[in-house]
Image (cartoon, rainbow, N blue to C red):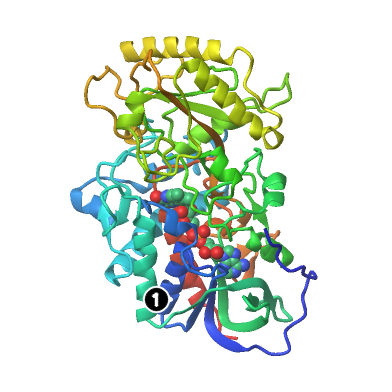
Amino acid sequence: MTHIERQSPRPAMPERFDEEFDIIVAGAGGVGLAAALFARWLGNNVLVLEKADAPGGTTQKAAFWYWVPNNEPMRALGIEDRREDCLRYMARLSRPEQYDPDHPRFGMSEWEYEAYEAIYDNASVATELLANKGALEYRHCAAVPDYWAEIPEDKAPTGRVLLPKDACETMSDGGKVAIRTMLAAAARDGIGVRTAHRVQRVVQDARGRVIGVVATRADGGHIALKARKGVIFATGGFTHNVEMRKNHLSAPVLGGCAARTNEGDFVHIGAAVGAELRNMNYAWMCPIVLEKALQQDPGLIGTFSPSGDSMIYVDKNGRRVTNEKLAYNESAQAFFQWDPAKCEYPNLVLIAVWDRRSQEHSASDEYGRFIVPPGADAAHVISGRTLEELAAAIGARMAQYSSVIGGMRTSEDFAANLRATIARFNGFARAGKDLDFRRGERPVELLFNGPTAATPSAPNPTMYPISDEGPYYAALLTGGNLDTKGGPATNARGQVVDRMGEPIPGLYGAGNCVASASARAYWAGGATLGPFLAFAYLAANAAHREPVN
Ligand SMILES: Cc1cc2nc3c(=O)[nH]c(=O)nc-3n(C[C@H](O)[C@H](O)[C@H](O)COP(=O)(O)OP(=O)(O)OC[C@H]3O[C@@H](n4cnc5c(N)ncnc54)[C@H](O)[C@@H]3O)c2cc1C
């Protein structure tokens, strides 16, 4: 990790600006590129500065589902998605402890409720504009359910998800497609994108208005750029800033899938000019392969699909502790359970165990799967001819990492417990009912089940008895970030606000670099990018309306 340059509370004005633009956008991920396009289409002269050597950010790793309430194809199909219902759904999941169905804002703060309104009112408008301008055309994933499709508050359980039109059948390259098409539109429409330019700070005039940025180039040189109307930050979260992870997240997260350059720069830059910080304790989460996270693999993809029907997760004692098929954000929470008597995180590492059936029918080298086919990178896979051999190999592998996982080791009775756990799971699989964790009972669990053997089958498609005969396989998993959710707060126009709730003139933010009002919720697939496009649109429009300085 490299630190942002130290700043005095009010850095001196540069002697002169090297260049001028109407609007400067920091960060060339999906949100920054969308904001730049929206601002350009309003007639502004726009520059994008990107810290990495190439544009794309975390977005280019994404499947790029985008969750767009009351979207155009829903309307065309006559699928009703009423504003009040959609806001209720968002509120119910974001802060369940505050949710009040009879309250005018469903128990949410004004800030949260206005953000939900902004999403509902603008995500579809933003999406249509991007599509009509040929920057991001989409197809409708009409059958994809929300992640809580079964709760009574979800009145439009399917239909809100869109995907870039040219994404492949497995949907794993949507982010690459979106970045490619938005970059092409940026080039076509005259937006400059400068890579290897890290924004270090904003420049304010005497009245506190943000009028430019100072950035560092790859050669270490500084450049000062004037923004006549405003600066929009879209610089991602703080997943790869270890200190910030430790100080702000409520869980011991060991890594994540965000772009390696997402180090929380805007938290420092925004705080230095008085921005209010919110929801620093939340992240978009996913189980990840422990070893890939510790190796800081830049290609790390989360385990979105916990594939394999004859597959279970067990703890260091060889016991199941969770429903393996939960949607990724919820599944990740199991790793951070706290044992108050032992003062430890007993599940910080869980072990996925599977047999030959899942190996042969559920393997894929696509998109973060831990069951990989022959020829794929299988360094994380542990194997044994018998359960006892597998247990010994798991113990040895885990011991290699004990210094970074709180000294965690497999227990002495791990192999015996694993055998008993498998016997119990196999009974559930034969009956089709998981009496311990209700695996496979919710629509979202079927969505992410992944491919399984067609025959023989069992009554519950997510569970099949684990074989009495080896070989057996395992992988160490932990909970990780896709990226973080906290940062400077913005209002419903995308303006960054100070600690008194007043907009900091000329300063805007969207995407994972600013606070998300979703708090602990992951409403559905695409619940980051759909709402972010709404805020990119709002920020660009508000910046466009700023007086020229
Ligand atoms: C594997 C994977 C799959 C996902 N799938 C989905 C999905 O299908 N749907 C969905 O909604 N979400 C998905 N997500 C989450 C989604 O990718 C992110 O929430 C979203 O892409 C964030 O966009 P962003 O533009 O805010 O940040 P990013 O795309 O991370 O872009 C931030 C950019 O800012 C740059 N930057 C950082 N600091 C500076 C600085 N100081 N100056 C200049 N530039 C800077 C970074 O280098 C980076 O390029 C997925 C995430 C992962 C990891």
Q: Position of residue 307 (x, y in %)?
A: 37, 32
Tell whether 71 sits left or right of 479. Answer: left
Residue with the mark numbered 1: 186
Q: Is residue 223 above or below residue 103?
A: below
Quarter that holds the N terminus: bottom right
Asked whether the viewer can see residue 55, the reply is: yes
Camera-side residue of 111 and 315 = 315
Element type where label 1 sits in the image: helix
Badge 1: how crowded within 10 Å, few (<14), some, or many (20+)? many
Q: Is residue 501 above or below residue 325?
A: below
Q: Is residue 263 above or below residue 399?
A: below
Q: Position of residue 196 (x, y in %)?
A: 57, 73
Camera-side residue of 356 and 169 = 356
Q: Position of residue 79 (x, y in %)?
A: 24, 45
Tell whether 9 sits left or right of 90. Answer: right
Tell whether 484 sits left or right of 376. Answer: right
Residue at 44% in and 10% down = 424
Q: Is mark 1 within 8 Å of ligand 1?
A: no
